[in-house]
Amino acid sequence: MAARVALSTRDRRALQLGAIVALPALLYVAAIKPYLRSVADAKTAIASQGDLLRRERALVASAPELPRAILVAQRTLTAADARLYGQRDPVAATAALSRDVTSALDDAGVALQRSEARDVVLRKDGLHELTIDVRAEGDLDGILSAVSQLEAGPKLIRVARLGIERSALVPAAANAPEALSLVATIHGYAR
């Protein structure tokens, strides 16, 4: 038989007061707080699903325009791909870039002295960046013409570093243009 502990009136009143204070706190932690969290999660899920529904409706509404947009995107990609070097091997692509640079320099009357290829770098956008360093001799008009031809040509070529100095070569005639030395770093791109 369990022994009953006799509590004084004062102790009973203290226990009742403690229960009255503790019960709402326990009720909040055990029931109200999880309920409020689930309501907030439901509101977030509803907002997310509503946003998804709006985007899907916009996509369905634009469905008749999609074939035309796809065609424009394909044409743009084809045009962009035409400006890239198409060789699958980065070494072959670098050789093609070197050939284009040599051709532009020859067309402009600039004598190529040295051409050196650097390692191919794979960029974050998936393109291979081809780099060559060149040293050439010619007059100012020829150098500017070669650089202009490279950057405005059919391939995507960028002259990243360009240095022009007086050349150690003496002009052939007194009225001949001054010979200049060109040092440049040239980038091309391949897929």
Image (spheres, rainbow, N blue to C red):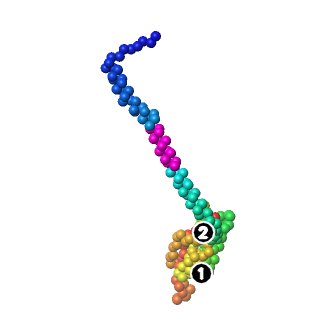
| Residue at the top extreme, as displayed | 1
Q: Amino acid at mark 2?
A: Gly
The residue shown at (60%, 69%) is: 188
Q: Is residue 112 visible?
A: no
x%, y% of residue 123? 58, 61
Circle 2 crowding by C-alpha within 10 Å: few under 14, some 14–19, many from 20: many
Distance CA(mark 2)–CA(mark 1): 19 Å
Q: Secondary structure at mark 1?
A: loop
| Image position of 107 (left or right of 32) | right
Q: Please name the residue shown 56% across and 55% down the image.
A: 53
Front residue of 75/14: it is: 14
Q: Position of residue 62 (x, y in %)?
A: 59, 63
Out of 123 and 15, give the one closest to the viewer: 15
At a point 31% along the width and 20% down the height, the residue shown is: 10
- SS for callout 2: strand
From the top left corner, tell me how far across and down residue 12 is, in percent. Answer: 35, 20
Residue beneath disc 1: 108
Q: Which residue is mark 2?
A: 188
Disc 1 residue type (three-letter): Ala
Q: Which residues are magenta?
A: 33-46
Q: Main secondary structure of the magenta part?
A: helix
Disc number lying in front (2 or 1):
2
